[in-house]
Amino acid sequence: MNPADIPIRDIKPLLPIPDISIYLFLAIVAALLLTVVAGAVYGWRIWQRYRRSDPRVAWLRRLESIDFENPKKAAYIMTRYGRLLAQEKRQKEIMAQLLPRLERYKYKKDVPPLDSETKRFMKLFIEMTKDAL
């Protein structure tokens, strides 16, 4: 058969194919960007929450709320949190002077009220720790 004898069928033009690859690319970039921003905001909030929750601040608040009318409880609280908070040399010196004074208010059923010298040492330590934080 001769190629000239083959009947020519209708040749249709190419169909337009919608090219949405740029839109897909932009959608993927936007989704990734949104994910990164959301992760950064979430991480920032968690970091801020843990940064603010310094246990030393909570211990200092506990020392500031000491009830001097209950000497036994005040002595135990001051001993516990004072040892934890004493980090500088001067604070350690005050705690070393304060701990023997607090011993007479612990381990007994009935204790005398806090004397003025012990109260003064306790308040001095609290003020120094407040200034250090």
Image (spheres, rainbow, N blue to C red):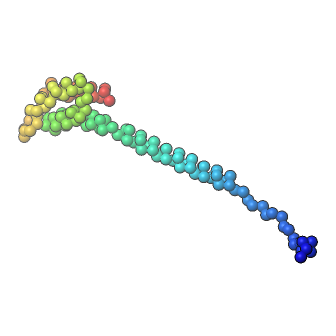
Q: Is residue 5 left or right of residue 77?
A: right
Along the line of sight, which residue is nearer the eye, 63 or 52? 52
- The answer to whether 126 is drawn above or below residue 30 in the figure is above
Along the line of sight, which residue is nearer the eye, 42 or 63? 42
Which residue is depicted at the point 65% across and 54% down?
Answer: 24
Instruction: Give residue 85's position: percent from left, percent from top.
Output: 25, 32
Along the line of sight, which residue is nearer the eye, 116 or 89? 89
Q: Is residue 125 left or right of residue 102?
A: right
- The answer to whether 8 is drawn above or below residue 44 in the figure is below
Count the labels in the image. Answer: 0
Which residue is depicted at the point 49% across and 47% down?
Answer: 39
Residue 83 occupies quadrant: top left
Quick one: which residue is furthest to the bottom in this view? 1
Which residue is depicted at the point 58% across and 51% down?
Answer: 31
Along the line of sight, which residue is nearer the eye, 99 or 7? 7
Quick one: which residue is furthest to the left in this view? 109
Residue 64 occupies quadrant: top left
Which residue is depicted at the point 37% across and 41% down?
Answer: 50
The quadrant of the image that shows the C terminus is top left
Decide if residue 7 is in sight here. no
Instruction: Give residue 28's position: percent from left, percent from top.
Output: 60, 52
Residue 14 occupies quadrant: bottom right
Q: Is residue 28 left or right of residue 58?
A: right
Instruction: Give residue 3's position: percent from left, percent from top.
Output: 90, 72
Quick one: which residue is furthest to the right in this view? 4
The quadrant of the image that shows the N terminus is bottom right
- The answer to whether 77 is drawn above or below residue 4 in the figure is above
Instruction: Give residue 8's position: percent from left, percent from top.
Output: 89, 72
Decide if residue 32 is in sight here. yes
